[in-house]
Structure formats: C-alpha cells, structure tokens
Image: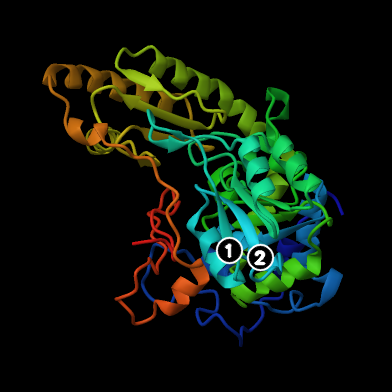
Amino acid sequence: MLDNDTPIYNTLKEYLSKSPLRMHVPFHNGFLISNNKIISNEICNLDISEVSGYDIEGKDNPIFQSEKITADYFGVSHSFYLTGGASIGLIASLIALNKYGKKVILARNVHKSVINGVILAGLTPIWLDVNFLQEWGIFGSVNSETIKKLISENKDICGCVIVSPTYEGMISDIKSISEICHKNEIPLIVDEAHGGHLFFLNKQGFKSSIQLGTDLVIQSWHKSLGSLTQSGVLHLVNKDFFDYQDLKRSLDLVSSTSPSFLLLLSLEQTRKYLSDTKGYIFNSLLNKIKSLCLIINQMKNFKLLESNDPFKIYFKHKNISGIDLAYDLYKKYSIEIESANEKGLLMLIGNAFNDDGVNKIKNALQNLEIEYASRGMPRHASTMKNSLTPQIPEFKTTPREAFLKGFRKNDIEYEKEVYAPCPPGYALKIPGSKT
C-alpha cells in the first residue's frame, strides 16, 4: 500500500454507499437525536462502530492496515492508533515491560499517566532528577550522565521513561541516552506527545525520537500534527525489547472496546495529508514563528526563552507574572494561550497561525508593555519570587501499594493519589511519597 492510502476511510465509504438500514449502535443511527444544531448530521454519519468491513480479523483489518501504512511512512515496526490519547500509550508501554516488582527510571517531569502506568504494572520508580530552570519555572532537558549514574547505582532496572521535547520545548540528547540504555540492556520509552512535528523538520536540524534509537515513542498527534483531540500514536520503533502482540494486549487492557471512528479517521487523514504534502505546513510556519520571536526579543521588558523547539513560544515579562499576563491577553485582546505559571507563559503554534496572528500578538504586547510601565509596582511580585522547583520526594512505599491501601483510608502517612494539574501534567504529589 502507498503512504497516502486510507483503508479506514475506504471501508467507511463502502459502507455508506449502501445506505444501510442501521440496526446497530450507536443509537443516533447517523442523525441528530434532538434539535441540536452544534453537531452536524455529517459528523454523526461518520460516527460508526465496528460494522461490516471493520470486523475482519488479522492483517486484512482496515485499522491494522492503516496503522501499518503509518508505520511504513515513519520507518518503524508498527504504529498503534490511540483514541484514548497518548496517556493510553504510555500506560500500555509500562504494562508491556512485563516486569512486575522491578525498577523503572522515570524522569521527574513525566506525565501523570506514566505514574498511573507504574501503579497498574506494579513497578518501582527510580526518579531521574531533571534540571529545573528556576528563572523560567520549567523543566529543562535530561542529563545523560545522570541516567548513567542511576543505572550504575541500581539493579533490576527494566526500563527508562523520559519526556522530549518537554511541554515548553526543551529537547534532550535522545541518541546518547538511547546508547546508554541499550548498553545496559534497558529499553528507552520516550514521551514525545509534544514533538511529532520534529520528524518533518530534519532539514532544520531536528529529529524525532523515532529517528534516534529509541524503542517506543508515544506521540499526541492532536497536540503537534493536527488530528482531533484525544488521538495519538504509539510507535513500536523496533522489536529489540517489545513485540506487536505484547503491546496490542497491553493496549487492549486499558482501551475502550468501542474506539471512536471519528478519531481513527482523523489519524488516518492526518497521515495522508502529511504524506501528500511532505509536512510542508511545518516549514511554511517557520518564517511566521521567526517574526513573532523577533518582535518579542525587541521589546524592552519581555524576554523569550531560547527553547530547542521553534513551535513552542515561551516568554515572560520582567515585572508581571505569567498568570497575570495571560489573563490580560485573553480579557483585553482575546488571545488564548496554552498555559502560564508565576514566571512566564507558553504559546503553541498551530496550523492556522498566520501573519494576522503575528500582528495581533504584536499589538497586544506593545500595548501591555506601555500599560505595565505606567503601573509602577508589579502585581504579585512576592509570588514571582517564590521557588517553583519540584522536589523528588521521600518515599515510604511503592505507588501501587500506596494507591491500593488508600481506599476509604485517611490516616495513612503517605500520599495515596496522583496530584498533577494539567497542563503540564507532571506530578506534584505521588502515591507512596511522604505526606
């Protein structure tokens, strides 16, 4: 099959061409069930279940075929479509390690779903301290030497999970980390939820983790490639530590038996678009991104983070918290940013970003710079001075044991829940850590 073939859509098109009497779920039968004018009949018509054509087993199944085409396009062994978000892929990856009771290296900034996966898989985390950029209030990249030290100090390590790029665009040396892990027979799992676009920026010097020797890479395509929200892909890059069947059964354990066909179609159509255009959209956006960065850098009281990923614009004002800046941008100029903290705020570039967007942000920031200068004392200055550094806590027991013992109990001396505000989703409280 070709890179732009669409087995999922072709099967759906064949089904719809027959105008069948729908005596099956979903209940809406392809039509609105009320006077709802928000969701169109066209969308309902595409929202089907495993009807004829999709119920084929094995390699003739159109979903499997579409996944295989995607895998061939990205140069990996297999690409699993995820309709429960990248979170499902991360959880399944930890289950697929099949190392109950063993140790796994987790970067301190892993997403909360990784901790959920550790709980389900019965693994013991060995925490990897990640450089924290106090000036910016965000995590930096992973130091490969720190991983090497952890491996030398611990036995029974069965895996390593890191985040690259980070939420704010910091990229780790995946090639070096992969070599260190593999030298010690440890599989490397990379959460690349925010980095799927790097695959298409090779000419600019970027590479995706799937090109740098990793074993599993989990991408959130709705965050970085343009599919619908809650769709993602788990790439089985090679078969050195995992195989198709182990990952499939691990995904089945935590996934719905009724996957959203709207999301499956979205993933397939996104891959087709990327194949047809060779990812042109990402290169076409770079000039606009450069223009915006130049504007921010030229402003006296704003400072731009020099992150590795050009599609993440993280900056701050020297006197105003990122939270207040984000509030003003939305309330006064109708600019909705991705996230903010006490230090700065994050803007993510999407495919609709254009020159009008650049000018709107420029005008807003210029006006706010004048407004803030006239105020004198900054708002929430004391908050901005507080340390934001997340610490690696002291653990009293494993996350799994703490979670299981936490039902209907309030008197235990350690945390029993994962507390991780999203975004960005890294844990502030972890089950098993000292209260």
The answer to which image quadrant residue 212 occupies is top right
Q: Nearer the viewer, residue 104 or 321?
A: 104
Left or right: where does residue 212 sit relative to residue 190?
right
Direction bottom: furthest residue = 23
Give me the C-alpha separation between circle 2 and circle 1.
6 Å
Q: Quadrant of the N terminus?
A: bottom right
Answer yes or no: do the residues labelled 2 and 1 have beta carbons within 8 Å?
yes
Question: What's the amino acid at mark 2?
Answer: Lys
Q: Which residue position holds label 1?
A: 124
Look at the picture and state if 93 lies above or below 49: above
Left or right: where does residue 327 sit relative to residue 119?
left
Q: Nearer the viewer, residue 155 or 316?
A: 155
Q: Position of residue 433 (x, y in %)?
A: 42, 61
Q: Which residue position holds label 2?
A: 102
Few, some or many residues within 10 Å of mark 1 (<14, 14–19, 20+): many
Q: Position of residue 116 (x, y in %)?
A: 52, 65
The answer to which image quadrant residue 379 occupies is top left
User: At 76% from the left edge and 59% from the top edge, which residue is drawn?
Assistant: 67
The answer to which image quadrant residue 90 occupies is bottom right
Q: Which mark is residue 280?
A: none
Q: Position of residue 185 (x, y in %)?
A: 79, 52
Left or right: where does residue 341 sit relative to residue 80?
left
User: At 65% from the left edge and 53% from the top edge, which residue is drawn?
Assistant: 154
Res. 154 visible in picture: yes
Q: Quadrant of the C terminus?
A: bottom left
Task: Say which label, 2 or 1, has the lower sequence index.
Answer: 2
Q: Nearer the viewer, residue 203 or 322?
A: 322
